[in-house]
Amino acid sequence: MTTEERRAAVLARLKNAKSPLSGTKLAREFGVSRQIIVGDISILRAEGEKIYATPRGYFVPESEGTEGLLVSFICRHNRDEMEQELLAFVDNGGEVLDVIVEHPVYGPLKADLLLTSRRDVKNFLTKMQKCEAAPISIVTGGIHVHTVRVPDEEALEAIKEELEKLGVLEETGV
């Protein structure tokens, strides 16, 4: 199999997957190292493919998902408040698409999260703890932006209220 054939097969595998696939799993399937898969994903993205990297693995969205409202929430909190913040989103019907920070040198840094449930939040936080990883908001004193898809205005208001009660909401924008 040539490199181009492998990349096409990786893309097809991602498009047909029902859930995210880890780089390790893809590497085993194609008989290459995980780093080769990481490189393949980077090249496919550079060619314009929509491939998301999440804590659970890579995936290609079925569609851009035009249902609901896309809202930006600017929040500030410490590491201990991260779980309550994320649960405020998912418990009220929100889908946390990403987290973005404004690095003083590199500019905006974005990480795809794609958290839709308590289970997703738990898995994300467990992985953070296992890896002893710091949240990317460490570079901004806790300030960060989440892009969240909400089903309707009612869910949006419920999320705002809960984040305000927690004292982590700085600002919102639709």
Image (cartoon, rainbow, N blue to C red):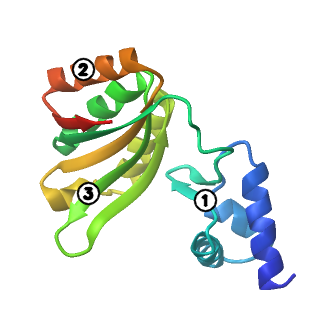
Residue corresponding to mark 2: 162
Residue 145 visible in rendering: yes
Residue corresponding to mark 1: 50
Q: Give the left or right position of residue 86, taking residue 55 as reference.
A: left
Q: Position of residue 21 (x, y in %)?
A: 66, 54
SS category of the residue bearing label 1? loop
Q: Where is residue 49 in the image (x, y as percent from the top left)?
A: 64, 64
Kind of residue sitting beneath label 1: Lys
Residue corresponding to mark 3: 101
Q: Distance between the residues labelled 1 and 2?
A: 32 Å
Name the quadrant of the N terminus.
Answer: bottom right
Front-lying residue, 166 or 46: 46
SS category of the residue bearing label 2? helix
Q: Which residue is drawn at 75% across and 48% down?
A: 17
Residue 31 visible in rendering: no
Q: Residue at x 40, y 37 (%)?
A: 148
Kind of residue sitting beneath label 3: Val
> For the residue carrying disc 2, how many other residues have a C-alpha within 10 Å: few (<14), some (14-19), or many (20+)?
some
SS category of the residue bearing label 3? strand
Q: Position of residue 66 (x, y in %)?
A: 56, 36
Q: Distance between the residues labelled 1 and 3?
A: 21 Å
Residue 145 lies, with reference to residue 104, above or below; the image says above
> Which of the two discs, 1 and 3, labels the residue nearer the N terminus?
1
Q: Position of residue 98 (x, y in %)?
A: 40, 48
Instruction: Choose mark 1 or mark 2, whichever is in front.
Output: 1
Which quadrant of the figure has residue 83?
top left
